[in-house]
């Protein structure tokens, strides 16, 4: 399997630049995306698709070149080859790109889909208005380095790892390739520095954005433990940290 790291979002935040670290996996069955960044329509009609307020609050920089679809085309693939998209959660900065792959099946926790449908104002219903096929997971049927896991219905060994709190169904995604595990933690932390610095200033933002902060801290603690115990064996990274993406610090 070939693994591409794509940055599908640029954010200018009070804490400096942030990104949208997505993964594109290529195997015999086609292409799988993990999270999707911003979508093409959002770069073309940002205020209509996202709203002026959201763009101003978040500091999104909306450029076509950041979209997954344009990057996939640039790599020489047909976007129609994207058969599956695994989502950590349904916040707007993670699922804008879904509409660019209308035939792909979306894989997500049942809790997150239920939460999205509950009309909570943090979500944008129009991002799923193309009505993609949904594959929702609710049973912890597996284990991943001591964490509960849900086996994904994909052609390669992969799991959703419940890391609830940021949203009520937020999950990490883990998969194995050539004997080496990758553990994508989504928004379990915003910056890798939070793993070792419990009073990092960005924790305030994470607290405000958490739907259940107690659960978020518990989830972050379980990520801390996996990194402390197995950091040498597992490639671990989150969605928003540019330092991880640009390999300013090792992903191991
Ligand atoms: Zn996010």
Image: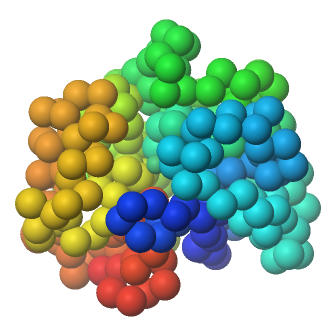
Q: Which residue is drawn at the image coordinates 66% and 60% (left, top)?
A: 61
What is the x, y in percent for residue 70?
84, 65
The answer to whether 51 is drawn above or below residue 202 in the figure is: above
What is the x, y in percent for residue 116?
52, 20
Query: Image quadrant for the C terminus?
Result: bottom left
> Which quarter of the figure has residue 139?
top left
Query: Image quadrant for the N terminus?
Result: bottom right
| In the foreground, 226 or 217 | 217
> Which quarter of the figure has residue 62?
bottom right
Q: Is residue 9 visible?
A: yes
The answer to whether 19 is drawn above or below residue 203 in the figure is: below
Q: Is residue 72 visible?
A: no
Q: Is residue 202 left or right of residue 59?
A: left
Q: Is residue 240 left or right of residue 6?
A: left
Q: Which residue is drawn at the image coordinates 76% and 22% (left, top)?
A: 129
What is the x, y in percent for residue 2?
64, 75
> Which quarter of the figure has residue 244?
bottom left
What is the x, y in percent for residue 33?
64, 55
Q: Is residue 5 left or right of residue 207?
A: right
């Amino acid at each position: 399997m070939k693994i591409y790291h794509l940055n599908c979002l640029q954010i200018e935040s009070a804490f400096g630049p942030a990104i949208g670290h997505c993964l594109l996996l290529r195997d015999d069955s086609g292409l799988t995306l993990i999270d999707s960044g911003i979508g093409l329509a959002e770069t073309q009609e940002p205020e209509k698709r996202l709203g002026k307020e959201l763009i101003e609050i978040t500091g999104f920089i909306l450029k076509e070149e950041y979209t997954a679809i344009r990057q996939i085309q640039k790599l020489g693939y047909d976007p129609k080859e994207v058969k599956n998209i695994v989502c950590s959660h349904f916040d707007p900065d993670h699922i804008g790109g879904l509409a660019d792959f209308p035939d792909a099946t979306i894989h997500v926790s049942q809790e997150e889909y239920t939460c999205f449908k509950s009309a909570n104002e943090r979500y944008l219903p129009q991002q799923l208005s193309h009505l993609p096929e949904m594959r929702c997971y609710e049973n912890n049927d597996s284990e991943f380095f001591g964490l509960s896991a849900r086996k994904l219905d994909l052609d390669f060994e992969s799991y959703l790892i419940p890391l609830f709190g940021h949203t009520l169904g937020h999950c990490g995604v883990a998969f194995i390739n050539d004997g080496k595990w990758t553990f994508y933690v989504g928004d379990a932390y915003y910056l890798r520095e939070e793993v070792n610095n419990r009073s990092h200033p960005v924790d305030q933002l994470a607290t405000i954005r958490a739907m259940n902060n107690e659960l978020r801290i518990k989830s972050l603690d379980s990520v801390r433990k996996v990194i402390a115990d197995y950091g040498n064996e597992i490639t671990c990274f989150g969605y928003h940290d540019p330092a991880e993406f640009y390999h300013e610090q090792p992903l191991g």
